[in-house]
Amino acid sequence: MLLKIALKNLLGARLRTFLNVLVTAFSFYLILFTSAMYDGMLQHAKQVTMDTEIAGGAYWHPEYDPLDPMTFEEAHSVPPSAIQALIDENKAFPVLVSQASIYPGGRIMPTIMKGIPPNQRIVNMPTDALLGHEDIAIPVLIGKGMASESKLEVGDAFTIRWLDTDLTYDADEGTVVHIMDTENFKLDMGHIWIPLNKVQSMLAMEGEATYVTYGKGVQPVQDKGDWIPRDINYLVQDMEAIIEADKPGAQILYLILLAMAAMGIFNAQVLSIFRRGREIGTLMAIGMTRPRVVGLFTLEGGLNAVLSAAVTLIVFGPILWYFGAYGIPLPIDYSEMGLIIAKRLIPVYTIGLVVSTTILVSIIVLIVSYIPSRRIAKMKPTDALRGKVMA
């Protein structure tokens, strides 16, 4: 009975109900869309990182810190036998990391020099481009960002200077044999990639590596020595931290939108109580208890959330579907800012996201509907019938 009366009253309000439902539905839509966008950013960053860099995980030399180039000098040794067995079975590949300087066009640029097996098939990198260049002193693979920064093109030669294990500086000529287009800026900016055996020979570190990346589904080894295992969750935590740091701005937008929707419903409830005093008095006079009258007005406000969900599905649903299917083209390349973000961002909608957003909006709507309705419990039926409403 209460539901039937509440729905009739709500539909009878027309314009007021329409505006409240539209604002709430728009808030619903933006919260869903923005949250899905962040989920899509994180999922894409994880997928690109796994595909191009970390695969199933890695084992690091205990001195290795990718954020501190000063550790590279000591972060190398022969991998433990169990890890070496994975390499021999082509389930993993080693990478040797060192600092270097390059001199493109007479300019000096500090860089990170990495040796990688050209025939590896574990991560999606065009390392096979380093094969078949026996006539070149040092074949070099770089990314588009590095090529733009250094003004290098395929076939360009430049000087590479490095410090070997005997703390002796040496130099030779490197030649760009391929420029890769990758979304993972960590493989591109400030990096040059050289065949592993060539780097081991240059640094006088035969058979040594800085870290070993293993394929997806490979079981962890037990006898890893002092090398440190790094799983996927550890290796993508920097991307998670960047995205989490940007979320407070979106949460402020959520609060503004919810406040707008709540304010509209709150004002509508207060206005209804003042304008419908005689109706309230009549309902109490014919025997409806005060709690039921309060429940009626609260239910009317709560139905706004139901209607808003329906409007979101009907009006904004096709928009959400379109962005989820075709993505959102971004105007700039965010890789230069240190972010792995697709040029066409695809939001990811999950059942948990939809359910949690629906519950949040519904609870807020019910609360702001109930607060003004409480004053009905203090009204006297005789005063209400005469149109007198307590302030």
Image (tube, grey):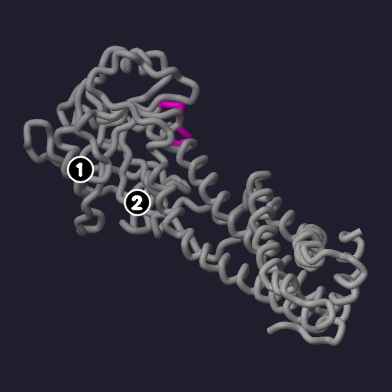
Describe residue 359's horizontal placement relative to residue 214 as left or right.
right
Vertical relation: 332 (above or below) 86: below
- Work out whether mark 1 precedes mark 2 in sequence or the reverse, and give the earlier one: 1
- Based on the picture, tell me whether residue 9 belongs to the magenta stretch: no
Q: Residue drawn at (25%, 54%), measured in percent from left and top?
A: 104
The count of marks equals 2
Asked which quadrant contains residue 300, the reply is bottom right
Q: Main secondary structure of the magenta part?
A: loop
Q: Nearer the viewer, residue 152 or 192?
A: 192
> According to the image, label 1 marks what residue?
99
Q: Which numbered marker is on residue 189?
A: 2
Q: Which residues are magenta?
A: 119-126
Describe residue 70's horizontal placement relative to residue 15 as left or right.
left
- Mark 1 residue element: strand
Crowd band around label 2 with a 10 angstrom C-alpha radius: few (<14), some (14–19), many (20+):
many
Q: Amino acid at mark 1?
A: Gln
Vertical relation: 369 (above or below) 220: below
Describe residue 87's horizontal placement relative to residue 320 as left or right.
left
- Quarter placement of the C terminus: bottom right
Q: Amino acid at mark 2?
A: Met
**Where is residue 152 shown, x and y percent of the image?**
34, 54
Vertical relation: 138 (above or below) 249: above
**Where is residue 345 shown, x and y percent of the image?**
59, 55
Crowd band around label 1 with a 10 angstrom C-alpha radius: few (<14), some (14–19), many (20+):
some
Asked which quadrant contains residue 290, the reply is bottom right
